[in-house]
Amino acid sequence: MTTIALLSVAPVVEGSMADEVAKAVAALDEFDVAYETNPMGTVVEADSVDELFAAAQAAHEAVDGDRVSTVLKIDDKRTSDDPAAEKVTAVEDALGHEAKRERE
C-alpha cells in the first residue's frame, strides 16, 4: 500500500520561512519516505499511515518558533500501490498535455 500526503509545516513569523521549512524537510530524511517539495508544501509517500504520521510529526517538531502551523492531507488508497506520479500522469493523459504551464 502507498500512502500519499501533502504536508505543510511553517512557523508563524514575519519574513522568510525558508530556513525553518528546510529543517522540516530535512527531518523527513530520517524516514523511509519519498518526498517532493513544491511552493505550497511537500508531497510525501510512505508505505503506511503510521510511517507517514511519524515523519510528519518529526517535520513539525523540527521547526523552531513560538507557533508552528502544520497541515497534513492524506490519501490512503488501500487498494492500490500507485505512486503520486501516477496521479499526475492520469491527469495529464486526460488533459492531453503536461499539467504545467509557465506564466507569460
Image (spheres, helix red, strand yellow):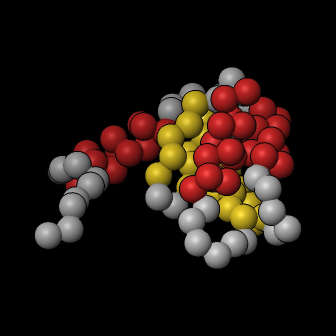
Left or right: 50 as drawn, with respect to 80: right
The residue positioned 28% from the left and 53% from the top of the image is: 99
Q: Position of residue 32 (x, y in %)?
A: 69, 23
Tell which of 54 and 22 is nearer to you.
Answer: 22
Q: Position of residue 9 (x, y in %)?
A: 69, 57
Q: Position of residue 57 (x, y in %)?
A: 82, 46
Number of callouts: 0
- Would you place residue 90 above or below residue 48 in this image? below
Left or right: 103 as drawn, with respect to 44: left
Q: Is residue 84 visible?
A: yes
Tell which of 35 and 62 is nearer to you.
Answer: 62
The residue positioned 82% from the left and 69% from the top of the image is: 67
Q: Is residue 6 visible?
A: no
Residue lying farthest to the bottom in this orientation: 14
Q: Quadrant of the C terminus?
A: bottom left
Residue lying farthest to the top in this orientation: 32
Tell which of 19 and 10 is nearer to you.
Answer: 19
Q: Quadrant of the N terminus?
A: top right
- Would you place residue 78 above or below residue 39 in this image? above
Residue lying farthest to the left in this orientation: 104
The residue positioned 64% from the left and 57% from the top of the image is: 8
The residue positioned 57% from the left and 49% from the top of the image is: 42
To which quarter of the image does residue 53 belong?
top right
Q: Position of residue 95 (x, y in %)?
A: 23, 55
- Would you place residue 6 above or below residue 26 in this image? below
- Would you place residue 98 above or below residue 66 in this image? above
